[in-house]
Image (cartoon, helix red, strand yellow):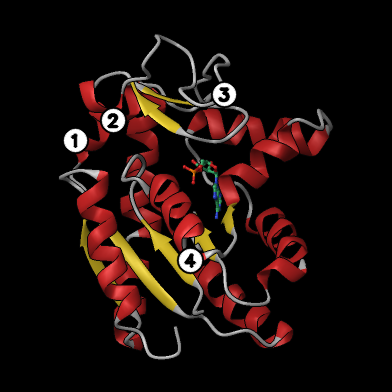
Amino acid sequence: MKSIVFIAPPAAGKGTQSLLIKEKYNIPHISTGDLLREAIEKHDERGKYIEKQMVLGNLVSDDIILELLAERLNNTDCDNGYILDGFPRNLEQAYAYDELLKKIGKELGIVIVLELDKEEAKKRIVGRHSCPQCGEIYNTMFEETKPLQEGLCNKCYIPLIQRIDDNEETFNKRFDTYIEKTAPLIDHYEKIGVLYRVNSGINKETTFKSIQKILNNQENL
Ligand code: AMP
């Protein structure tokens, strides 16, 4: 299967779509945000630095990201493709990723942009909660994505958590960072001919249908 890179503003659903693809196509989901959140849990100097950048809505240094990612891609579960959620986040990372792929003998695959406007993204951020055990994502702002029991995962029945950077102030900074640093990647990958655009503004089912259409049309899927 070809690997998939997601480019998307905050709350466009790259985590949700990654989990749906993972289930249906059986390839691992690698979220650099999750790798960073795990690194924070070590409570060392690096973890403190990462936490500070995340809370400010800044990007974490390319060196740290590349180190964490290279380590993760080494795992044999990545041999038949993987979903990359949250990387690359700027052109420097895209170039470094090309080098890394050459070094480890893997192909880029395809790049999917999830398109969502700022106001809708903001609404989604404020209510976003997730299950610390299974990773299921809920949104308390919308009837159809609320947990059945307030504050509890529908599957695991344990309390939901909210991310340290899911608040309005950090959201504004993250969105600006996306426009300034990450959005230029869209042009970059369009020129290479690997880019697909998906409207992420309706609901997760519609978005997933569009993604499946793209994946099923790939040769050597
Ligand atoms: P995400 O979970 O993808 O929304 O990422 C949450 C936060 O983690 C971002 O706002 C950044 O602070 C940091 N982050 C995630 N991926 C990267 C990356 N590829 N480069 C730099 N910082 C990142």
Closer to us: 63 or 35: 35
Verify CB contact (< 8 Å) between mark 4 and mark 3.
no
Verify CB contact (< 8 Å) between mark 1 and mark 3.
no
As measured in the structure, the alpha-carbon distance from the residue carrying label 4 to the one carrying label 2 is 26 Å
Dot 1: element: helix
Residue at the spot of label 2: 124
Image: 54 above or below 93: above
Mark 1 vs ligand 1: CB under 8 Å?
no
Mark 4 vs ligand 1: CB under 8 Å?
no
Mark found first going from the N terminus, 4 or 2: 4
Dot 4: element: helix
Residue at the spot of label 4: 25
The residue positioned 43% from the left and 33% from the top of the image is: 137
- Amino acid on which disc 4 is placed: Tyr
Report whether residue 29 is seen.
Answer: yes
- Amino acid on which disc 1 is placed: Glu
Mark found first going from the N terminus, 4 or 1: 4
The residue positioned 30% from the left and 52% from the top of the image is: 179
As measured in the structure, the alpha-carbon distance from the residue carrying label 4 to the one carrying label 3 is 23 Å
Horizontal placement of 99 versus 178: left or right?
right
| Relative image position of residue 210 (x, y in whole percent) | 23, 64
Image: 132 above or below 93: above
| Relative image position of residue 24 (x, y in whole percent) | 45, 60
Q: Residues within 10 Å of mark 4 (few under 14, many from 20)?
A: some
Q: Which residue is situated farthest in the top direction here?
A: 150
As measured in the structure, the alpha-carbon distance from the residue carrying label 1 to the one carrying label 3 is 29 Å
The residue positioned 25% from the left and 72% from the top of the image is: 213
